[in-house]
Image: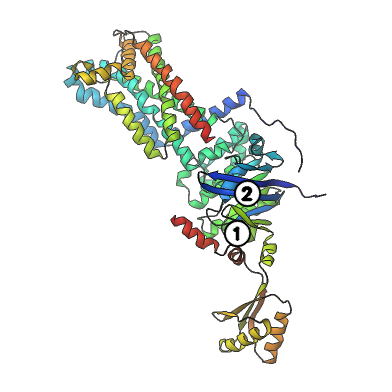
Amino acid sequence: MDAVTYAIEAEGLVKRFGGTTALAGVDLAARSGTVLGLLGPNGAGKTTAVRVLATLIRPDAGVARVAGFDVARQPHQVRRLVGLTGQYAALDEELTGVQNLLLVGRLLGLSRPAARARAAELLERFGLTEAGGRRAKTYSGGMRRRLDLAVSLVGRPRLLYLDEPTTGLDPHSRNEVWSIVRGLVADGSTVLLTTQYMDEADQLADDIVVVDRGTVIATGTPDDLKTKTGGQTLEIRPTEPARLDRVAGIVEDVAGVRPVADGGRLSAPVTDPAVPAAVLRRLDDASITVTELALRLPSLDDVFLSLTGHRAEQDEAVAGRA
Amino acid sequence: MADVSVPAVHRLGPVTAAQHCLTLAWRNLVQLRSNPGELAAFVIQPLIFIVLFVYVFGGAIAGTSSSYLEYVLPGLIAQSGVFSIMATGAGLNQDITNGVFDRLRSLPIARSAPLVGRAIGDLVRFAASLVILLGFGMLLGFRVHTNPAEVAAGLLLVLAFGVGLAWVSMLIGLLASSATTVQLFSGVLMFPITFGSNVMVRTDTMPGWLQAWANVNPVSYLSTAVRGLTTGTPLGSSVLWSLGWSVALTAVFAPLAIAAYRRKV
């Protein structure tokens, strides 16, 4: 028997908007207490999937269960368990940070003092205590995102959906969001994270579902996906740049492929695990020293490229113009 | 997969649902309180209207500004219903566009709460603005010639009409693609029914076609009713017509607005 419990399970989700098919039969499953990364370019159907799982829209076909509750038939139970942070901070701009938190606390049935205490606690945790009395309108992008996250945590949800939580954030704010997500998972929450950034999925997700044009094109752990794409990359940087050609020759000899030079570094895809050692021996024989010799798994960016034939972020630029 | 046997439909108790509505009404009122600009506009705008009409046009229209005050203040009270309630749809539309509506829908709250809460909040605001108008008018010398019960009845009549219009406004807010559209559309709707009425002047100097409109305009009935209930001028059938219009607006537009709302939730 399968001992793993799934916090989210979806089978064959279909959603059409007029003539466009946003979801064309999506299956996904998130294990309890882990981060499931939904990875794909803009327009892949990520947000639609999140909206279905958050009970905001009904699927045209397929079933989705959140903690065992059917999103279409038991939306109220699902809403009790899920916190949602959408792509754009859904804050009441005219209210202060505290008031935004109080509003949701009261709607979730907390007493006035309990809602106040919870608001203070969350502001503290997200470094917004000082800004708490100011209207959300005056917040910076990073502060808004943190307040939005705080608002979605008021009811201590068991599941948290984060729809592109770091899009448009500077690297500092991005790191903050990442550490918040790690903290939540450490506390036992299940997180559904959509992103179009490979490194974000790589950093945070335990499992990844890659979607493109409404269909799942790959599933697995980040490492699975990298291995699936086949092979690893050998990277070598000779101490003397002048010997680059000689080193390239050796690598080509051993690995059977001509390496690509990038600055003073060569990289070549390898499938045979014996290659690095052989290359090293040949270099030693030729008395060539190297400052860098590494075998790395392909990045998720490489994975996405090999799965879809296009890069994720290029696609974003195209979608942005459309 | 675990088979969880829970009722497919979960209903909230009426008390809980009412609390959700009141919390959202609170939000609506806090927005006003914590926004000095909006608060100032809310209080000052009706005052500017009174001062403008009474002192700028008053003498020319009615001979003296004090006699015009007595004529125009009840009209302005009736008219303010149209103006202030149009904000309901714009606010609803803004919530939908900026994602607040989705956040509310993702919470385990009564489905009707975002709509009803906003309506309650706006009606409270509206009631407050009526009191401000009447109070400021009295400061300037407006005298009530009837009794407090009649004055209260007049204000309630305006509120009832406001409820009827709130449905229209909500329908516009739910159907419009942006807040700008809401404002444009509301403006187009608002001017003929406020200015094409007996709110500011008697209709007998208007050309026949306009007079015909002004005489059947619901705002004219409402303003005649408020005038009668505060200054003792003849009421005729104005109270009945005002009530009738309020009921009719609600009867026609409440189902339409609720249907439009259901498609969103």
Q: Earlier in the sequence, mark 1 or mark 2?
A: 2
Q: Residue at x 63, y 82 (%)?
A: A291
Residue found at the very far right of the displayed protein: A1
Residue A145: horizontal and vertical position, in percent? 53, 49
Q: Position of residue B160 (x, y in %)?
A: 42, 18
Disc 1 residue crowd, few under 14, some 14–19, many 20+, Cα 10 Å: many
Task: Give the alpha-carbon distance from disc 1 to disc 2, as whole Å.
Answer: 25 Å
Q: Position of residue B70 (x, y in %)?
A: 26, 15
Q: Nearer the viewer, residue B49 or A224?
A: A224
**Residue A316 location in percent, x, y?**
50, 58
Point 54% across, 40% down: residue: B102
> What residue would you read off at disc 1?
A200
Against B30, residue A238 (above or below) is: below
The chain letter for the residue carrying disc 1 is A
Image quadrant in which the C terminus of chain A is located: bottom left
Disc number placed over residue A25 in the picture, else none: 2
Q: Which mark is residue A287?
A: none
